[in-house]
Image (spheres, helix red, strand yellow):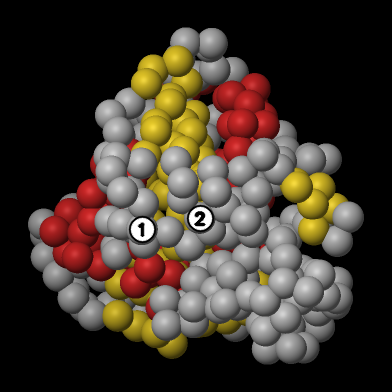
Amino acid sequence: MVSRSGHRLGVRRGWGVGIACALVLLAGCVSGATSEQTRMSAPASTSPGTSTPTVQVAGRPVQLYIPASRPSGATAALVVVLHGYTGDAAGVVEFFGLRPLADRRGFVIAAPQGTTDSEGNNFWNASRSCCNFQGSGVDDSGFLSRVIATVIATQGIDPARVYVLGHSNGAFMAHRLACDHADQVAAIASLAGAMDTDAECDPTEPVSVLQVHGDADETILYNGGEINARPYTSAATTVARWRSADGCSSHVRPGERLDADANVPGADLRPTTWTDCRGGTEVALWTIAGGGHIPALTPAFTAALVDWFEAHHRAG
């Protein structure tokens, strides 16, 4: 696939995460939304250890993964996982390696599907820069809010332990969702995502935010860039905005390095956390030194990511 800028893009559809849109520079998108999509269709409760790829919420598919074992009567955490541009729901769960941890730790995974543009590419209408290239009017922020509400109502979810994880276009969408529906989200993690430089983000409540980004990412640039002349933030600016929104102090806590990307030798992850934020939240930047846009994530990274979520539930 060759973009208008002349760069050849390799889309790793086997993982379903696709490629994000910084070099794609496509034009246009058909509307994937209708008035019927504002209605909620609650899924039936599912049995442990099964996936339900055809659950419908607001007329759109959501894959649910229910842990194999869960204490009777106990509420569970929910991790909403958002695929990248051209990706899909099943692929992004595999990419992050979440299902074995869900079984061991007892959290529920919800993997919604974005809508499809006229060229057959799945996308989220997350921001002006990424990745609604055809001007769709689909309200993905509203849709994902309904997904969270529906899964909480039907699957015994603890509302204080709702987390959102996205890659690339899905990471842009995670930021958007936290800006728009902070009351439903305890924490988000963005891998290789960003925000519009002029994005309006005034969350009603503080949200813990983890920005993960490879400093060798050539698709969504670590130091910021633009797509179709629409600029997006650098990793540093992204976390600075959330530090401001969450009222964080200037106190910085370094973290333990680990091997996050199997394609990069050694302990490539460099974590930095800003603490003393409102409501007990924190904002963190995990830089993958030498990491690209689609890292080969290690089990150690996935475990650290889930640990971070579990440490950042909404305060009582």
**12 w.r.t. 300: above or below:** below
For the residues labelled 2 and 1, say whether their Cβ atoms are less than 8 Å apart.
Answer: yes
| Amino acid marked by disc 2 | Gly
What residue lies at 28% left-to-right and 29% top-to-bottom?
256
Q: Helix, strand, or loop for circle 2?
A: loop
| Amino acid marked by disc 1 | Asn
Res. 82 in view: yes
In front of the other: 14 or 161:
14
How crowded pointer 1 is (Cα within 10 Å; few <14, some 14-19, many 20+) is rated as: some
Report x, y in % for residue 156. Answer: 30, 60
Q: Which residue is mark 1?
A: 263
Report x, y in % for residue 221. Answer: 65, 49
What residue lies at 61% left-to-right and 43% top-to-bottom?
222
Rounded to the nearest angstrom, the CA distance separating label 2 from label 1 is: 9 Å
Q: Helix, strand, or loop for circle 1?
A: loop
Q: Quadrant of residue 85?
A: bottom right
Residue 247 in the figure: left or right of residue 289 = right
Quarter of the figure that contains the N terminus: bottom right
Report x, y in % for residue 77. Answer: 31, 52
Q: Earlier in the sequence, mark 2 or mark 1?
A: 1
In front of the other: 59 or 94:
94
Q: Please count the marks in the image.
A: 2
Q: Which residue is mark 2?
A: 292
**213 w.r.t. 270: above or below:** below
What residue lies at 43% left-to-right and 26% top-to-bottom?
272
